Amino acid sequence: MSDYFQKIRNQVMWDRLIALVEEQARTMMRVAFSTVVREAGDLSAGVFNAKGEMLAQAVTGTPGHVNSMARSVVHFLDEIPVETMRPGDSFITNDPWKGTGHLFDLTVLTPAFHRGKIAAFFASTAHVADIGGNGPAPDSRDVFSEGLFIPISPLCVAGEMNQLLLKIMRANSREPDKLEGDVYALVACNEAGGARLTKMMDEYALADLAALSDHILTSTDKSMLEAIARLPKGSWTNAMRIDGFDAPVDFAAKLTIDDENIYVDFTGTSPMSKFGINCPICYADAYTTFGVKCIVAPRLAHNHAVRSRIHVTAPEGCIVNAPFPAPVTARAVIGQMLPDVVFGCFDKAQPGLAPAEGTDASWSLRLNASPGITGHRGGSVFASQSFQSGGMGAHPNQDGLAATPFPSGVRAIAIEITEAMTPLVVWKKELRRDSGGAGKRRGGLGQSMEVSSREDAPFAIFARFERVEHPARGRHGGGDGAAGILALKSGKVLKAKGTHIIPAGDRLMVEMPGGGGFGDVLARDPQAVLADVRDGFVSVAAARDTYKVAVDDALEIDAAATSLLRFGG
C-alpha cells in the first residue's frame, strides 16, 4: 500500500472515529432520563487509545466536560490495573478532582476489546438530575455537603451492574429513577461506541489502533506546531473582575507563547471562596484550554495532541485551583469565565483578534419546590433545571450572537418541556432590547424571562448568576453589555447568588446580561443601526443617544437629524 493511499485511509478512519463518538453521545441523549442531558446535551463522549490519550471527541458536549474527562481517564488507569479489566467492565466516579469538577457529573470509563485485547477506552460524562446533599445551591461550606461522593469504583463487572452501588446512589438522590436511568445511559453509550469500533476495525482489518493513533496524534501535533509558529512570541497579561459570591473575584492571567508551547498561569487570582463557586484545576484547565484553542486553532480536530501543547497552572488555594474538600458545586460560575480572561491576553498579543467579553457563565434556571426548601407542604414537589443564556461579546468582524451559550455550548431547554413536567408557567421569553454593548460590532443581546407557578404555592430558585455587578466589557472602544437583573415582579430585587423563595402568586423576573461591543460606536453603519431598530434589538432612543442615528416614526433614518447629532449644527 502506497504512503499516499495509507494517508487517505487513515484520514477516512479518523473521520470515522469522530462520527463514531458522536453516535456514542447521541445514544446517551436518546436514552438519558435527565432533561439536561436529553435536551440540552450537557455531556461529553470520547474515545481514547490504550495509553489513555484522547483520539476523538463527540461534537455534542461541553468543553468543560470533554477536556476534564480527558484528564480523568488517566486517573482511572492509575487506579485500575489494565490487566485486570475484562469485557463487560465499566468504572465510574464523580470525584470533582478526578472527574469534571463537581458531584453532579458522573464519568464512566469502559474498555473496548477487540480479538481478546483492549483496543481502546470509551469515556462519557453526564450531568445527572440530583446527587443528594444540598443540591445545586452554592451555599455549602465543603464538598461533603454537596452530595454523594463516588470514588473511582467498579460499575459493571463482566456485564453485571454493581447493584450495591446503584442502591447507595438511589438512596442518596431525590430523583432515584432519573439517576439510575442516567447511569444506564452512560454504560449504554460507551457500549455503543465499543460495538461501532469493533465493526470499524473488522472492516479495515485492524488488529489494534496503534498506527491510527500515531497518525492522528502526529498529524494534529504538526498542525498545532504550525499554528503556534504563526503567533507572536512573548508574554502578556490580563485581569478581569466578576461579581463572586460575597465579594468580587479577580482573575489574573499571564499568557506566554514560545516556539512550541502555550502557557497560561493564573498567579494573582483571588483566593478560594468559602462558598461553592470554587473551581478544581481540572475544570479551570478545561475551559482555559478551550479558550486558547478558539484563538489558535479553531478548526483543528481536538484530541490529546492539542491539549499537550497548552499548559495551565494556578497556585493551589486560589479560586481556579481549589483543593479537596472545597465546595465546588457551582464551579461553572468561575470556569466558564476563563476563555474571556484568555481572550484578553491574546488581544494584547495581537490587538483586534479576540472578541469582546460576553455573559460567559450560563444563566441556568434551577427551580425547585419541596417542603424542605420552601417550607410549604402544599403543591407539587419538583426540581427543574433549564439552561438559558445571555449574549456573546461582539467579534471583530461580526455582531455578537444573542442568547447563545458560549463557552459551554449547551442548548436551551424548550419552555414547553419545563411547563409539561412542572407546574411552572413561562409568561415571557424574549430578547432583551438594548442589552448588547454598543460598538462598530454590537454585542449579543441577553433575554428576558418571567416565570410563575400555576399552583397556589411558592417555589424556589437556586441562583448562581454572574455579570450583575460587573457586566461584560467592550473592547477597542465598544460599550459594555447590560448587567443582569434578578427580581420579583412585586418589586424586590434578589441577590444574584443564593436560594430565594418566590411567593405564591408572584413572578420571577430574569433579565439576562448582554455581550460587550467591539470598536467605535460611531463607526457602525447607520443602516445596521436602523436594521437593529426595526428588529427590536435597539430602541429608537438608544439609536439616537448612543449611536447618533435618528430614526423617525416611519422607521426610516432622518438624515438631517442624524447629521446634526453626529456633526453638530
Image (tube, grey):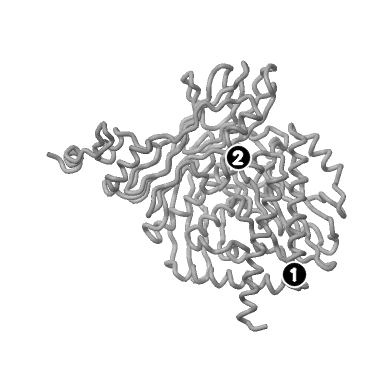
Looking at this view, name the residue that lies furthest to the left: 569
Asked if 268 appears above or below 417 in the picture, the reply is: below
Q: Is residue 241 visible?
A: no
Q: Quadrant of the N terminus?
A: bottom right
Q: Position of residue 238 (x, y in %)?
A: 43, 53
Q: Residue at x 28, y 41 (%)?
A: 547
Q: Which residue is mark 1?
A: 203
Q: Position of residue 71 (x, y in %)?
A: 66, 57
Q: Position of residue 377 (x, y in %)?
A: 70, 17
Q: Position of residue 14 (x, y in %)?
A: 64, 67
Choose top left, top right, bottom left or bottom right for residue 39: top right
What is the crowding at mark 1: few (fewer than 14 residues within 10 Å), some, or many (at least 20)? few
User: In the displayed structure, does residue 151 sit left or right of residue 96?
Assistant: right
Residue nearest the observer in this picture, 45 or 170? 45
Whether pointer 1 and pointer 2 mark residues with C-beta atoms closer than 8 Å, the reply is: no
Q: Amino acid at mark 1?
A: Glu
User: Secondary structure beneath disc 2?
Assistant: loop
What is the crowding at mark 2: few (fewer than 14 residues within 10 Å), some, or many (at least 20)? many
* Number of numbered discs visible in the structure rendering: 2
Looking at this view, name the residue that lies furthest to the bottom: 2
User: Secondary structure beneath disc 1?
Assistant: helix
Q: Which residue is mark 2?
A: 330
